[in-house]
Amino acid sequence: MNNFEYKNPTKIIFGKDTIGKLTNEIPADAKVLMLYGGGSIKKNGVYEQVKTALAKTDLIEFGGIPANPEYAVLMDALKVIKEEKITYLLAVGGGSVIDGTKFLAAAAEYEGAEPWEMLKNKERPTKGMPFGTVLTLPATGSEMNSGLVITREETKEKLAMGGPALFPTFSILDPLVITSIPERQLVNGVTDAFTHVLEQYMTYPAGGLLQDRFAESILQTLIEVGPKVIKDPTDYEAGANFMWSCTMALNGLIQQGVPGDWAIHMMGHELTALFGIDHARTLAVVAPSHYKYNFEAKKEKLAQYAERVWNVTEGSIDDKAYAGIEKTEAFFHQLGIKTKLSEYTDKFEGTAEEIAKRFTDRGWLGLGERQALTPQDAEKIVKMAY
Ligand code: NZQ
Ligand code: ZN
């Protein structure tokens, strides 16, 4: 196991009817900007619950952060933060609103002229405006991590960054919010969280016995409750387990002391930037090809996964490893996710070359757990996913 230091400062408030607890979490003297998305919170009662809890707080609102949070919109929010002398941010939404809020927390303290530079330079902010979140969509884990991903339509880019100052102070996780989530987003949530675990697990045996079993247990729980939540979002027990699994999948815990891959996300982000495909679906497109292409390097963990998560007990290491890839793709299909790029766009020709070029231009010459995946490898993987 590798050495590690681990600190996660986010307070989690989990459970039914907990949004009212906001009252106790936001400092009494704060001037708050509440940020939200396209309006789902106004239809499902979350907006009312937040406003009621913060009736005595000095609060203004900024709505309209789109899925795949758009840089230009966030720059409008930054103006409000500066003009109104905001001191505290509150994200009410899914990964996009939370990521946008994190970016604003960093941008509010940024001294340069163009906050996009923070993403280009992969800065790791150590200063940020404090913020809390009310999570409305289990998927990304953003509610308990310090990472963020921002999209810029102007340049068709989607870039990630993170830093110690970008953990939420608190996050409220009320599984009742799940009842209003459309099926497409529930499917995305299960798939994204599932792939987050895979990115931190499907590498090579690294002696992280406990990390492996944490990871396998999250995968097994998602396999158990994912289809139940999709079928019936009012199933509270399934929803609560789904929500906590998504958070645990990417709050840093299972990544400690072990290698991480994350190449699926890097390729997937480009597919969202180029075609606007939902984040989770891009992962389901890339993952099967990625695992087939890197079969030799990953087969021991693939076989362990097949055995422990999918109960594949017959055959050689290679047989089991291959079955692991097939089970994964079948699971995505079972959820209703298409796993080929050509099923999302007919303009896929040239995509692999474009992604390889972008990686080369950015100096991303070695991705994956061994920093050995070259832009040419990425090109071949994306082609396999056509
Ligand atoms: O905008 P509104 O109207 O709120 O509607 C949203 C949006 O259209 C809707 N929704 C959310 N909660 C709802 C609801 N509809 C009904 N009832 C509710 N309770 O769902 C739609 C999608 O929301 P979004 O926030 O975009 O989804 P998600 O949570 O999947 O976030 C995706 C973004 O997170 C990034 C992705 O790249 C993408 O930009 N990621 C962030 C990560 C992180 N910070 O750690 C890691 C991930 O790998 C991912 O890259
Ligand atoms: Zn993801």
Image (cartoon, rainbow, N blue to C red):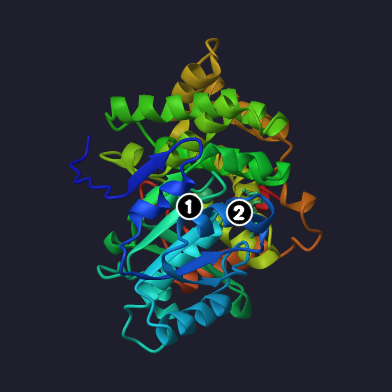
Front residue of 344 and 26:
26
Left or right for 189, reference 363: right
- Residue 349 visible in the snapshot: yes
Residue at the (31%, 64%) spot, across then down:
28
The image position of residue 274, as x and y in percent, is 66, 67
Amino acid bearing label 2: His
Which corner quadrant of the image does residue 1 belong to? top left
Which of the four quarters of the rendered structure image does ligand 1 lie in? Answer: bottom right
Residue at the (63%, 44%) spot, across then down:
188
Q: CA separation, marks 1 and 2?
A: 21 Å
- Residue 145 visible in the snapshot: no
Left or right for 263, reference 153: left
- The answer to whether the residue labelled 1 contacts the one labelled 2, judged by CB atoms less than 8 Å apart, is no
Q: Residue furthest bottom?
A: 113
Numbered-mark total: 2
Amino acid bearing label 1: Val
Q: Mark 2 points at which residue?
A: 279
- Judge: label 2 CB < 8 Å from ligand 1: yes
The image position of residue 109, as x and y in percent, is 32, 78
Residue at the (45%, 78%) spot, across then down:
116
Mark 1 or 2: the one toward you: 1
Residue at the (66%, 34%) spot, across then down:
233
The image position of residue 150, as x and y in percent, is 51, 67
Give the secondary structure at mark 1. Answer: strand
Q: How crowded is mark 2: few (under 14 residues within 10 Å), some or many (20 or more)?
A: many
Give the secondary structure at mark 2. Answer: helix
Name above or below for residue 128 compared with residue 181.
below
The earlier-in-sequence mark between 1 and 2 is 1
Q: Mark 1 points at which residue?
A: 134
The image position of residue 230, as x and y in percent, is 68, 33
- Judge: label 1 CB < 8 Å from ligand 1: no
